[in-house]
Image (cartoon, rainbow, N blue to C red):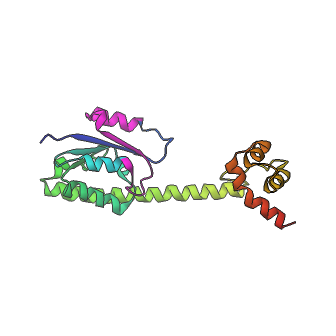
Amino acid sequence: MKSFLYGYIRVSSKDQNTERQWDALLKFGIEEKHIYSDKQSGKDFDRPHYKRLLRKIRKGDCIVITSLDRLGRNYTEIQDQWRHITKFQQVDIVVLDMPLLDTRKSRENLMGIFLADIVLQILSYVAETERNSIRQRQSEGIAAAKSRGVHFGRVHKPLPGNFNLVMQQWQQGELTAKEAANMMNVSCSWLYRKLDLFQNINNCK
């Protein structure tokens, strides 16, 4: 059975650039159609294109990644996935920036396997530690911004000036929901979402 080279690319967010990873994998000789890419956190392996890749690979194939943290950033799960791919599915893995992590070379070499296992554990630990550091820096940045008065989340628009009058007319049956929405220049769905607010305002009077 013919074996294939596959590439896997991952970045953590949609606005991050994957071009460097694409260039490296194409330069390695992987066909574009055999490269799978996710723009998702490395905290776990619940990623659509990664799952598609695992369903595609067969015994004797090889997966290439530019660095171990592109595979993931969870210490335990990286090692579990590595063992599942290399032992259970019998597929090789090549990490371009770490030549020791190339199972094609170490599969029959006891010392190579030993060294690769050590490097895998160290890099898995580093990957998760870096993820935790990023999360900590983000939390600290958000807290600092809030202390300066920066607000996060959806910006709520002020209610239309004729809100109470139109809502009263609508509830009394003088207007249809569509007419009321048009008078306030809003959608009907917005109108129904604000119904509870209107009732609470009246209850406070």
Residue 8 percent location from the top left of the image: 33, 44
Give residue 66's quadrant in the image.
top left
Q: Residue 152 versus residue 184: which sits nearer the camera?
A: 184
Give the camera-side residue of 91 and 57. Answer: 57
Residue found at x 39% / y 51%: 47
The residue at the point 63 percent across, 56 percent down is: 142
| Quadrant of the drawing holding the C terminus | bottom right
Classify 181 as above or below 116. above
In the rendered image, the residue lying farthest to the front is 173
| Residue 188 versus residue 114 in the image, above or below | above
Residues 176 and 161: in front is: 176
Residue 194 appears left or right of 2:
right
Give the total of numbered labels.
0
Is residue 155 visible from the viewing direction of this image? no
Q: Is residue 200 left or right of residue 192?
A: right
Residue found 41% across the figure and 59% down from its top:
128
Q: Position of residue 53 (x, y in %)?
A: 30, 47
Residue 31 appears in the rendering:
yes
Magenta residue check for 37 = yes
- What x and y, as percent, mark residue 126? 39, 57
Q: Position of residue 50 (x, y in %)?
A: 34, 49
Let me know if residue 22 is in the magenta part: yes
Tell me where the magenta segment starts and ends, as one range. 19-48
Q: Quadrant of the N terminus?
A: top left
